Image: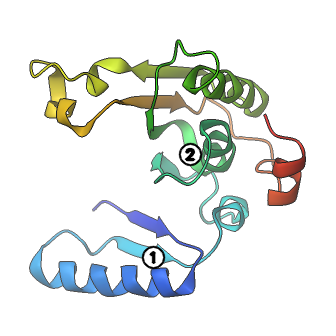
Amino acid sequence: PSEIALVESVGKKARFLDSALEVVGERLSGTAGWRTIGARVETVARDPVHRGRWPLVTGRAVASLANLVELALPLLEPGGVLLAWKSGDPADPGGFGAEVEAAERAIAALGGDRIMIDASLGSRDPDSRAGLATIADHRLVLVGQGRRPIDDRWPRDPATRRRDPW
C-alpha cells in the first residue's frame, strides 16, 4: 500500500486535512496510508522517521524553487524526485531564470544530481502531452535527489535561509 504524508505547520489547517482524509477515506478505498503531520517541514526533514524515506516529494506554492529544494531533498530517498509546479520562462534572467539558477546552486550544495524543466506541460498547445496545457503558463520542474543521503546540516533553519539565500 502507498503512503502519503501531508505536512502542514498550522494546526487549524492540519486538523482540516485530517478531517478531509477521514471523509475521503470513508468514500474511497486506498487512503489507509494517508496521514497528516502537524509540523514545520524543517522539523520533519530532520526526523529520522522521515529523512531520506520518500520516493517523491511535492509542495504547494510555499517557497522559491531553491528553498523548496533545500526543504524537500532531505526527505527524499536516494534516487527520489522532487516535483514542483512553477510559472515563468526559464530563459527570463530576471524572473524564473534567476530562480532556476538559485535552485541549481542549492542542488549542487545538497548533492542533488539534476534538474529538468518540462515546458511542454505549460504549453497552451492542445496537442501537448498529459492534458495539462490548459492550466496556464506553468512548467513541471523535476529535481533528482542523487544517489547518496543528504548531509545532516540541511535544511538550514528559517532565519539562516533568510539571511543567506541561494
The kind of secondary structure element at disc 2 is strand
Instruction: Give coordinates of residue 3: x percent, y percent.
Output: 37, 63
User: Is residue 116 toward the left or the right of residue 121 in the image?
Assistant: right
Question: Residue at the location (29% across, 79% down)?
Answer: 21
Instruction: Give coordinates of residue 152: x percent, y percent.
Output: 81, 49
Question: Residue at the location (46% across, 54% down)?
Answer: 60
Q: Which mark is residue 76?
A: 2
Q: Say if 83 sits above or below 58 in the image.
A: above
Q: Say if 141 sits above or below 89 in the image.
A: below
Q: Split into 4 quadrants, where in the image is the C terminus?
A: top right
Q: Nearer the viewer, mark 1 or mark 2?
A: 1
Q: Based on the displayed image, in which of its 4 quarters is residue 108 positioned?
A: top right
Q: Which mark is residue 81?
A: none
Give neighbour class at mark 1: few <14, some 14-19, many 20+ (Cα, 10 Å). Answer: some
Judge whether residue 85 can be spotted in this image. yes
Q: Which mark is residue 36?
A: 1
